[in-house]
Amino acid sequence: MNNAKMNLILHPVRMKIVQSLLNRKEMTVQQLSERAKDVPQATLYRHLNKLLEANIIQVVQENPIRGTVEKVYALNEPAVHSQEDLLHLSKEEHLELFMNFTTQLLGMYETYLKQNDVDLVKDGVSFSVANLYLSDSEFMDLMKGMATLIQKAMINEPSPERTGRNIATIVIPESKGDERK
């Protein structure tokens, strides 16, 4: 994704629209306005049009309603159904997927912070970057160990003693100094 698209998305209203449409959600202007109550409808339409022009969102359905047309919007996302699909994406499509992932994280964190009783320490909120030097074998062992621990915790059922927590992982190798575009 080029810098112009990323800067376009970083506007608070457009970010809210993109966050609302994550995970293949489809929404009308009315549904989007319910999620962005403080945004006047004319402003919402203006930002939707900017996202449409940049090909970040698309109209997936048009419903005739009382002499007008209600549009249903969705994100333009690369279709990834398998590891094979992932391997055939362009660099721009990979950046779009990553942007959607990080936008979703941003929305989750924003929702958490809007609560009245936020206690970051008690709730275990954290985010950090650890720069590790590992052989391929050591890296695979680390990933398998983390996967085993996470899978073990994922079978826990909700209960009064358990708090739901979202754990996201991102693995990005360091650049090898080859800055080809």
Image (cartoon, grey):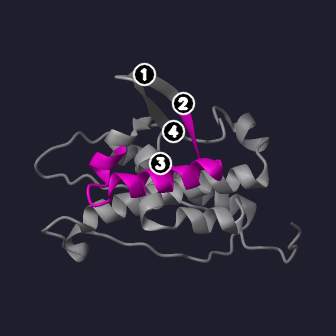
The reply to whether the C-beta atoms of the residues labelled 2 and 3 are less than 8 Å apart is: no
The reply to whether the C-beta atoms of the residues labelled 2 and 4 are less than 8 Å apart is: yes
Query: How far apart, in angstroms, are the residues tagged by discs 1 and 4?
Result: 18 Å
Query: How far across and how far down the image is residue 90, in percent?
Result: 79, 49
Identify the residue at image location x=27%, y=47%.
34
Q: Amino acid at mark 2?
A: Val
Q: Which residue is mark 3?
A: 148
Q: Which residue is mark 4?
A: 74
Q: Quadrant of residue 116?
A: bottom left
Of the numbered discs 1 and 3, the one sitting upstream in the chain is 1
Of the numbered discs 2 and 4, the one sitting upstream in the chain is 2
Q: Amino acid at mark 1?
A: Pro
- Can you tell which of label 3 and label 4 is closer to the viewer? 4
Span shown in magenta: 32-60
The reply to whether the C-beta atoms of the residues labelled 1 and 3 are less than 8 Å apart is: no
Of the numbered discs 2 and 3, the one sitting upstream in the chain is 2
User: From this viewpoint, is residue 96 visible?
Assistant: yes
Query: How far apart, in angstroms, are the residues tagged by discs 2 and 1?
Result: 14 Å
Query: How far across and how far down the image is residue 158, in percent?
Result: 20, 42
- Can you tell which of label 1 and label 3 is closer to the viewer? 1
Judged left or right of residue 148, residue 135 is: right
The label shown at residue 64 is 1
